[in-house]
């Protein structure tokens, strides 16, 4: 397939300043996953301008954050400015949420990065994944992060990339929209500006600027 985006710099061009070193130093996005926890710990010690540290819960929180009373937040985690965390949301630790993000009802997040202006609004699971700038997951979208056989995840693109990691979810490029109740299998990568039909089971690496109607049916996106 043409227009494949595999490398970190290709998938994630818009990144908060405090995360630029993390993204620049890792050529491939799966290399970021084992470093999320330490990155958060370092930033909580250093501080981010305008953020408040909640030592009791090990959270670094920006301005104008709305957190529902029934949400559960377990650190270490960073919550950006103007974030809305809705009822029943579950942040399990090692999570970085950028600015202007919607974390929806009954959604679960674990060891992941959700970049600025993304929306994950209803009944979603995001584990060991990175969601790009202004990405959107429809209701019920699952970023599956563990193979049935428990073996290390392999990224299947033009060549196969060994990751040496058992748990990898999805890497979703910028301005991507994933339709309701889709399941993204471990190691799925979706290129920037692409769209996924509802009820799709996706696996492998998909190009940028395409409409993904099914795992095998992919057409150029009409702009």
Image: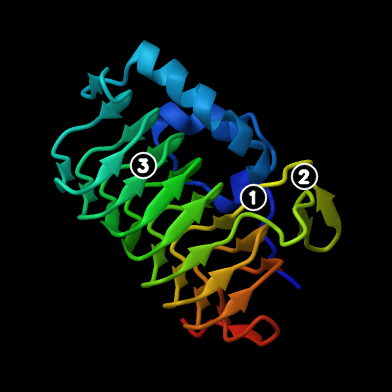
- Which is more toward the observer, 37 or 31? 37
The image position of residue 193, as x and y in percent, is 49, 68
Separation (CA) of disc 3 from disc 2: 24 Å
Query: Which disc number belongs to residue 168?
Result: 1
Q: Earlier in the sequence, mark 3 or mark 2?
A: 3
Q: In the image as oriented, which residue stretches furthest toward the top?
A: 45
Q: In the image as oriented, which residue stretches furthest toward the right?
A: 159
The image position of residue 187, as x and y in percent, is 68, 57
The image position of residue 212, as x and y in percent, is 58, 81
Q: Earlier in the sequence, mark 1 or mark 2?
A: 2
Separation (CA) of disc 1 from disc 3: 18 Å
Which residue corresponds to the image point at 46% horizontal and 43% vertical from the top-left? 113
Q: Quadrant of residue 56?
A: top left
Q: Badge 3 is on which residue?
A: 97
Separation (CA) of disc 1 from disc 2: 9 Å
Q: Label 1's element?
A: loop
Q: Badge 2 is on which residue?
A: 163
Query: Which disc number belongs to residue 95?
Result: none
Which residue corresponds to the image point at 55% horizontal and 29% vertical from the top-left? 22
- Which is more toward the observer, 35 or 23? 35
């Amino acid at each position: 397939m043409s227009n494949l985006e595999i490398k970190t710099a290709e998938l994630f061009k818009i990144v908060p300043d405090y995360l630029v070193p993390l993204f620049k130093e890792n050529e491939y996005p799966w290399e970021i996953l084992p470093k999320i926890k330490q990155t958060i710990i370092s930033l909580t010690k250093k501080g981010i301008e305008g953020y408040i540290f909640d030592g009791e819960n090990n959270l670094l929180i920006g301005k104008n954050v709305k957190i529902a009373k029934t949400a559960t937040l377990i650190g270490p985690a960073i919550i950006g400015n103007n974030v809305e965390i809705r009822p029943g949301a579950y942040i399990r630790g090692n999570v970085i949420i950028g600015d202007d993000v919607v974390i929806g009802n009954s959604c679960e997040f674990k060891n992941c990065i959700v970049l600025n202006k993304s929306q994950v609004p209803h009944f979603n699971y995001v584990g060991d994944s990175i969601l790009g700038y202004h990405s959107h997951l429809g209701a019920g979208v699952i970023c599956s992060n563990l193979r049935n056989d428990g073996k290390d995840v392999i990224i299947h693109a033009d060549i196969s990339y060994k990751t040496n990691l058992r748990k990898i979810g999805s890497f979703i490029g910028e301005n991507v929209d994933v339709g309701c109740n889709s399941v993204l299998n471990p190691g799925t990568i979706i290129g920037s500006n692409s769209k996924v039909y509802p009820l799709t089971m996706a696996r492998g690496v998909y190009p940028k600027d395409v409409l993904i109607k099914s795992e095998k049916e992919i057409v150029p996106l009409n702009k």
